[in-house]
Image (spheres, rainbow, N blue to C red):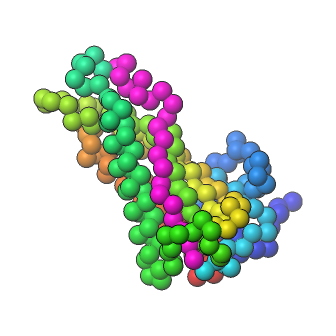
Amino acid sequence: MKKVWKTKLGVLVTALVTGCASQAPQETHDGLVLQPDSKFQEVYILPGADLSSYTEFGLADCSVAFRKNWLRDQNNSRMDLTRRVTQKDVDKIKDSLGEECTRFFRQSLQEAPPYQLVDEFENGEAVLVLRPAIINLDINAPDTMSPGINRTYTTSTGEMTLSLELFDGTTGQALARIVDRRRAPDMGRLQWTSGVTNKAEADRTLKRWAKNLREGLDKATGR
């Protein structure tokens, strides 16, 4: 029998998650329950939670983490030492992608009618905090800006996964958690991949995530 959560947060599920959750656990360690059928692959919500009571919203800076062994695997395939990916390259990519992620989410929340965003939200009452993270980042051909003319060809720029948590700013109680893995389209043929093409594909994914979140949050809060 299909269970229906009689809260406005249940509307978030309808607006946010689509299928592909058959392999996901049905309940998390902190009591959030998996809900299918919306625009993200996995959405977990806390039964009985209600987002409509929040009047202020906080957006934490987006963190970024690469796939395990990504740096090692990249350098194993690079015979030219001048083209090796360094820790400095990794940090630069993480900082840049994190800033872009935060920017897209903030822009989406500030579209009319805007949400009231606050910078200090850890101890504020009635503050719903959104904490985005990009995990398992896998860039097939990172642009290291090495000297000389170098071109890399791939069929896809790579993939990344959004892990977004919504929690109460006062208690720290997690109310919802979203997980969505996105892989760049496989073109079926080799194409020149550069920092420009990597950024363009990442921006398309970030824009999609931000749009889907805003639409679901609007419905969940009664906007």
User: Is residue 39 part of the magenta span, yes or no?
Assistant: no
Residue depicted at x 49% and y 70%: 119
Quick one: quadrant of the N terminus? Answer: bottom right
Residue depicted at x 48% and y 50%: 63
Q: Residue 182, image x and y in percent? A: 49, 47
Q: Residue 150, image x and y in percent? A: 18, 29
Residue depicted at x 65% and y 75%: 125
Q: Is residue 134 above or below residue 35?
A: above
| Region in magenta | 56-77
Left or right of 44 in this view: 68: left
Quick one: quadrant of the C terminus? Answer: bottom right
- Res. 189 image quadrant: top left
Whether residue 11 is visible: no
Most foreground residue, 211 or 93: 93
Q: Is residue 184 above or below residue 118?
A: above
- Res. 110 image quadrant: bottom left
Q: Residue 164, image x and y in percent? A: 57, 56
Return the residue found at the far left: 148
Most foreground residue, 65 or 161: 65
Q: Is residue 52 above or below residue 31?
A: below
Number of labelled discs?
0
User: Is residue 58 part of the magenta span, yes or no?
Assistant: yes
Left or right of 162 in this view: 86: left
Return the residue found at the far top: 79
Q: Residue 138, image x and y in percent? A: 44, 37
Q: Is residue 125 above or below residue 193?
A: below
Residue depicted at x 51% and y 60%: 60
Whether residue 95 is visible: yes
